[in-house]
Amino acid sequence: MLEWLQTASAWMQGWLSPNAGLAGVFVSALLSATVLPGSTEMVLTAKIVAYPALAWHAFGMALLGSGVGCALNFGMGQAARNGWERFKHVQVDEEHSRVARLRRFGPPVLVLSVVPLVGDALVLAAGWLKMPFWHSLFWIVLGKATRYLLLILGLKGLHAFG
C-alpha cells in the first residue's frame, strides 16, 4: 500500500533533501495556492515519507506558502476589480444571485478554498468583492491547515500500521 508513496518519495528525494526540502514545500504551496496548477499534497507527502521527523516543519512551510499564495490571489481579485472599474468607468453590479450568496455567507465560506478548481475562484471572488482581508485570510488558512493536518495525520497513521 505504501509502495507508491515510497516510489514518489525516492523520485523527489533529490530535490527534497532535508536542507532544500522545506523551501521546496513552501514554493510548491505558494504556487499551488495561486491560479497556477500544482499539487502541494504530493510534495508534502514525499517530504513526510522521506523525512518523517520534519513533518511538522513541512506543515508550517506548506501553510505559510499557501497563505502567502492565497493573499496574492486575493490581491489579484481586488486589483482586477479596481482595474475593471477604472477602465469601464462603472461600478460592478453585485446584485447577481451567486455574488449575493457569496456576500451573504461572507468570509467563512472561504474555508472551502481547499476544494480543487473551485477554491482559487472563491479566493479571487473574495478579493473582487473586497471582503475584509484579514478575516478572509483567517478562514482560508483555517481550511488549508485542516487539509494539511488531515494529510499528515493520515500519513502518520499509514506509517504506524504499514
Image (cartoon, helix red, strand yellow):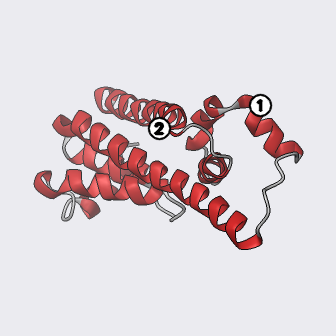
Q: Which amino acid, by three-letter code, is at mark 1?
A: Arg
Q: Which amino acid, by three-letter code, is at mark 2?
A: Lys
Q: Horizontal placement of 159 versus 132: left or right?
A: left
Return the disc, 2 or 1, that comes first in the chain's sequence.
Answer: 1
Residue that carries the numbered disc 2 in the rendered image: 144
| Nearest the eye: 149 or 50 | 149
Residue 6 in view of the camera: no
Q: x, y percentage for residue 46?
A: 30, 51
Q: x, y percentage for residue 113?
A: 58, 42
Q: Horizontal placement of 26 versus 17: left or right?
A: right
Dot 2 surroundings within 10 Å: few (below 14), some, or many (20 or more)?
Answer: many
Residue 21: numbered disc: none
Q: Which secondary structure, mark 2? A: helix
Q: x, y percentage for residue 98?
A: 83, 44
At x 47%, y 53%, the residue is 33
Foreground mark, 2 or 1, reads 1
Residue 128 in view of the camera: yes
Marks 2 and 1, Cα distance to the nearest angstrom? 22 Å
**Furthest-left residue in this view:** 19
Residue 104: numbered disc: 1
Q: Horizontal placement of 52 versus 116: left or right?
A: left
At x 32%, y 30%, the residue is 156
* Residue 104 higher or lower than 32, as above or below: above
At x 25%, y 33%, the residue is 56
Q: x, y percentage for residue 118?
A: 66, 50
